[in-house]
Amino acid sequence: MTGRPANASEIDAQQLWFNGPQQVDVRQVSLPAPGTKQLRVKTLCSAISAGSELLVYSGELPEKMSLDANLASLQSSSTYPLQYGYACVGEVTDVGDDVDPAWLGQRVFSFQPHASHFIATTDQLMQVPDDVDTESAVFLPNMETAVNLVQDGAPMLSEQVVVLGQGIVGLLLTGLLAQHPLAGLYTLDRLAGRRQQSLALGASASLDPQTDMTKLQTTILASEGADLVYEVSGVPDALNQAISVSGYDSRIVIGSWYGSESAPIALGGDAHRNRLKISTSQVSTLAPGLTGRWSKARRFATTWQMIRGLQPHRLISHRRSLNDAAALYQLLHDRDQDVLQAVFTYN
């Protein structure tokens, strides 16, 4: 099968590179025509992760650790210079030999570092459903993370659930948990704008962890503690707050990746006597108890369905070109409270 259009040739592309802590630049590269079994994609938009990606920018990744052992585009080590990013939506513009021409013009998602164009194979691309908005599609990785967190925590009927952190993953998780018949869903974040978004997504109450912890512990949870607590703030010390709101035999699910950061955790006293169950959640794999019936494909299908329902593009706060990357990453690094979800847009 011959798929390459007769006019396919090299093109100029832009790529974002991390050169060191708080150092980024945009490189102009020549991108070849797609080879056999390859496709060339023009990027429409790509989302910045304020979690792992900010660790790359800040220089806080563990040394000698691969960026993601499960993604072909991110199997390099975490040494500079490097490319990073994993939420890219684009359009197939050229296909090589042995690629079905039906791919041409398709909107696709790829776990691909930020770039204006890139080369991929079909197994590195997912077609974006026709009824999913392009900007909502870039939320696929974070929504899949939220779906995985729900599956790992397994919330039950009439449980009291607490979510620490209302960044993008925390907000998406809140939106999913709000669909469950819980007795209460309580979220914590220090930023008022995020607490307002949390309430709009269905939280029973959204509180400031700096001022409202006592209220949550003694009044809202009536000193009984939460049944299930999610820690997705990205702040290691927040695990102590998760412990403090837990009840007897509670489950704590840690969804944050702290990179090289750490904090002393109080595992004596109530944490010990309450027989807490503390587990980590990571989206690269499925919960072992689900693997008999679930696959990555099934979880992706569920994720697309959750995207249709929540329409997460409304959480985008900043749209910038790749040339504005340095300023945009610095805003994230400085924890500018106006930045919720930042995306790069491409002409």
Image: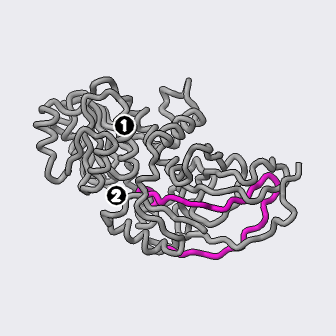
Residue matched to label 1: 279
Tell me the residue at 57%/56% (across/down). Answer: 88
Tell me the residue at 88%/52% (across/down). Answer: 2
**Magenta span:** 24-53
Q: Please say if 262 is above or below 128.
A: below
Residue 45 picture quarter: bottom right
* Residue 291: in magenta span: no
Distance (Cα) linking label 2 and label 1? 18 Å
Tell me the residue at 33%/69% (across/down). Answer: 334
Q: Sort mark 2 into few (<14), some (14-19) or many (20+) by Cα contacts within 10 Å.
A: some
Residue 139 location, x and y as percent? 49, 50
Q: Please say if 279 is above or below 106.
A: above
Residue 168 in sight from this viewpoint: yes
Report whether 247 appears left or right of 234. Answer: left
Residue 307 location, x and y as percent? 49, 43
Of 191 and 282, which appears nearest the observer? 191
**Number of labelled discs?**
2
Check disc 1 and give the amino acid type.
Answer: Ser
Report whether 206 appears left or right of 112. Answer: left
Tell me the residue at 26%/44% (across/down). Answer: 187
